[in-house]
Image (cartoon, rainbow, N blue to C red):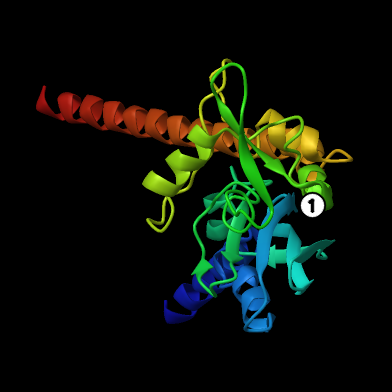
Amino acid sequence: MKRKLLATFAVALVLFASCGGSREDRFVKNPVDDIVRDMPADRVFSILLYDMNVEGNFSERFYHQYKIIEEVESGTPTERTTEWMEVGKRYFQQHQDDMGMALATRGEDGELVKSVSPPGYNNYVGKEKYGQWQRHSDGHSFWAFYGQYAFMSAMFNTARYPIRRSYYDDYRGNYYGRGRSYYGPSTTAGGRYYGTNSAYNQNSRRSSSTWSQNRSNFKSRVNNRTQRSSSTSKTSRSSSRYRGSSSRSRGGGFGK
């Protein structure tokens, strides 16, 4: 009997591992923490979520790619894109809506901010060193970079998606320093101004993202697993009802 129980337990462990449970649930260190740790202590930087991907069917692994905007020379931001980095499932789900957003920033004052914010909002927008607010004929004020910093306008795509002062004031007054994610105002279509599915994110990419190409397949796999799970659950409940019905029938027969 004891040997039989041990054999059953061993088979269960093999099945659990083959279904990916051990891999999905294993601890994966947050790569953003590593990037921050390796930055020089006085460097101004922003870490943006550039792309996402999910690989595997039964045993899924989750990946991020980051764009780092940093000032190797003070006042002159440059950008680079990292290689693909594995992240934990929970961290991936936490930031699934944050493509194109800054996940961590450090400004000239040395303050590290790790709440999700639109690119440029923490280190460049609103800073008189880089530009100014310009009032338009419609009464709204928009951020404009000075000529020598025109490359920042391209970097943050502000020509096509201008930053209103009301957006910036809303972020600074209600989100900054409070650990809350800010995605800008709602669009006329009911979506978000910034974030994974926003027009801003999709149009700021020079090429289509891996996530935009693969997310339909990922969603399809999730839906298929959900449907199989639901089908199995229904079958189990149906079988239980059948067994219960048979038992009651036999009980009725004995009572007659």
Amino acid type of the residue tagged 1 in the rendering: Tyr
Q: Is residue 220 left or right of residue 212?
A: left
Residue 71: x and y, percent? 75, 70
Residue 200: x and y, percent? 70, 33
Residue pictured at 88% horizontal, 40% vertical: 206
Query: Relative to 142, is 20 above or below?
Result: below
Residue projecting furthest to the left: 255
Residue 241: x and y, percent? 32, 28
Question: How many circles with numbers are drawn on the protein?
Answer: 1
Query: Relative to 148, is 226 above or below?
Result: above
Residue pictured at 74% horizontal, 63% vertical: 68
Q: Quadrant of the C terminus?
A: top left
Quadrant of the image occupied by residue 193: top right
Residue 188: x and y, percent? 57, 15
Q: Is residue 107 left or right of residue 230?
A: right
Kindly identify which residue carries mark 1. Answer: 149
Foreground of the two, 177 or 128:
128
Residue pictured at 67% horizontal, 76% vertical: 43
> Could you classify mark 1 by the number of other residues whose Cα lies within 10 Å: few (under 14), some (14-19), or many (20 or more)?
some
Q: Does residue 198 appear anywhere in the picture? A: yes
